[in-house]
Amino acid sequence: MQALQLHASFSSQGEREAAASQVQFSMTRAQCNMIFSDDIFDSLVTEITDLGRSIGCSAITPPWISLYGDSQMQNFHIDPKQGCMAWTLSLSTGYGSSFSGGETILLTPKVLDYWREYDGTRGKEAPALARFLPPTFGRFVAFDPRVPHMVQKVAASGVGPLEGRIMIHGWFAEPEVIWYGEELEKSKECQAILNEAIDGIVNVLNSEIGRVTGFLAVRLSILQDGTVVGMSAVCDTLREDPSDSVGVVGYDEEDREVIEDSAADIRLTIRESLGGLLFPETEQGGDVVIPFDFV
């Protein structure tokens, strides 16, 4: 016991100082509107905003451009308050040739919920614990900003700054119902039908289902006769909030515990509420994206 106490004492020595000395980031960055011409900047914002609209976000935060040279990196962090989803666009042309490293690293869901499916019979190495997304030219990545992520240290010795890791990045923000189809968008009756359905969903979620966190965007496809013929989740980062979990809600036929799955219950409620909607007839039909932001 004395040896165990001694080991515990020594193992924590200097830990606080070591943590405080970690480099959080070491890249060079600037706002994109300070780097690009007005025409290029406006085109960039328009195209990325259009991508955000496809998942029910009506705007993006002011985009940054970052340059990572030799030995530069960004340490693990989260940034959940900036927007519903984070995004990056790579302008790097030298990945694998003029530089190595610079991958975006995301911890996997199993690591974030580590003990639920812990297997002590075998070890795990980096590829089983994190995702490694290479910064190849033109690659656009959107991800849940609540997930701990980092940028791997870049190795780019002896090359110019434009041959390193170059990224444009920001966040999708301002969730809003997005209509695709001019007739649907301008129809007050369509908006009233959808608003009534959303109000009903919110009432059910508030009274019957345990709390979750995350962002869910659902896209409905609507025929000319107003019927909904397709429904899909175009973005889904829902996770149950452990602090508000009911836990065991019953038992199955074999007397096994049934654990509440709030995220699944919410998805089912939304599907049942939206799938049977009937909108007014239009000449072309269209689509609508409906965001649900659980903060």
Image (tube, rainbow, N blue to C red):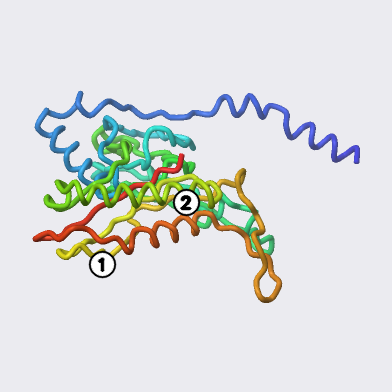
Q: Residues within 10 Å of mark 2 (few under 14, many from 20)?
A: some
> SS of the residue at dot 1?
strand
| Quarter of the N terminus within the rendering | top right
How packed mark 1 is, by other alpha carbons closer than 10 Å (few <14, some 14-19, many 20 or more), is few
Q: Identify the image quadrant of residue 151.
A: top left
| Residue at x 40%, y 56% (from the top left corner) | 270
Q: Residue at x 31, y 27 (%)?
A: 29
Q: CA distance from mark 2 to mark 1?
A: 24 Å
* Picture residue at 22% right of the left edge, 42% below the top: 48
Task: Say which residue label 1 marks.
Answer: 229
Residue, disc 2: 204
Q: Is residue 53 left or right of residue 238?
A: left
Mark found first going from the N terminus, 2 or 1: 2
Residue extending farthest right:
2
Percent x, y of residue 186: 14, 46
Question: What's the residue type where badge 1 is placed?
Answer: Val
Spot occupied by residue 140 in the image (x, y as percentages of width and height): 28, 48
- Answer left or right for 287 relative to 7: left
Q: Looking at the picture, which amino acid does disc 2 mark?
A: Val
